[in-house]
Amino acid sequence: MEQIPKEVIEMAEDFFGYMSNEEHINLINEYSAKQVKLEIFFTESLKVIDDKNVIAKCVKLYLIIYRCYQYYDINLPQIGADIVTEEMDKFMNRYDKRFGTKTTDKELCNEMKELTNQNELVDYACLKIFGTDENPVKYNNPKLWYNVYSLIFCFIIIMNNETRKIIDKDLN
């Protein structure tokens, strides 16, 4: 499966940048209807985030990432709760294995690049989650970055794996 090009990500960001809150809500509802279990996972994951600005950032990332996967022009069937739960568990197990070891933002992002083969999308998400060395994103709670990171990257992994299944099936 080819990577989502940087231009597609930029167009998705621009697309949502000019929308009103009402238009955002309409698209969230549209996306939610297409992927009910994924939306439930996303909504439930947001409940542990107590910063409204961070929630808004996560919602915008969700919309942009979802739109980016439309680049593949496939009809993605409903993703089941079992798949969402399995991928969340795998993600958490990956992190738990490293518990107590110091891992940099760059290492986390590189790991996601290897896992998804979506370099541009991972770079974009990492920039929004972590910022840059010169201008890091500051969170009011030291654990909040991990909530955002795990939510966004579980979402990317699920979308990526399920999209890849359809594309691989169509190729065979």
Image: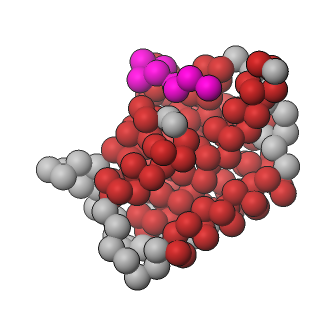
Residue at 74 percent across and 48 percent down: it is 38
Q: Residue furthest front?
A: 172
Residue 57: percent from the left, percent from the top? 45, 48
| 25 left or right, relative to 114 | right
Any magenta on residue 6?
Answer: yes
Depth check: give the residue in front, 125 or 100.
100
Q: Residue furthest left?
A: 134
Any magenta on residue 105?
Answer: no
Residue at 14 percent across and 50 percent down: it is 134
Extent of the magenta region: 1-8
Residue 110: percent from the left, percent from the top? 39, 49
Determine whether 146 is above or below 161 in the image.
below
Residue 50: percent from the left, percent from the top? 49, 68
Residue at 75 percent across and 60 percent down: it is 86
Q: Is residue 122 at all visible to an observer of this figure? A: yes
Q: Is residue 56 at all visible to an observer of this figure? A: no
Residue at 39 percent across and 38 percent down: it is 124
Q: Quadrant of the C terminus?
A: top right
| 104 left or right, relative to 33 | left
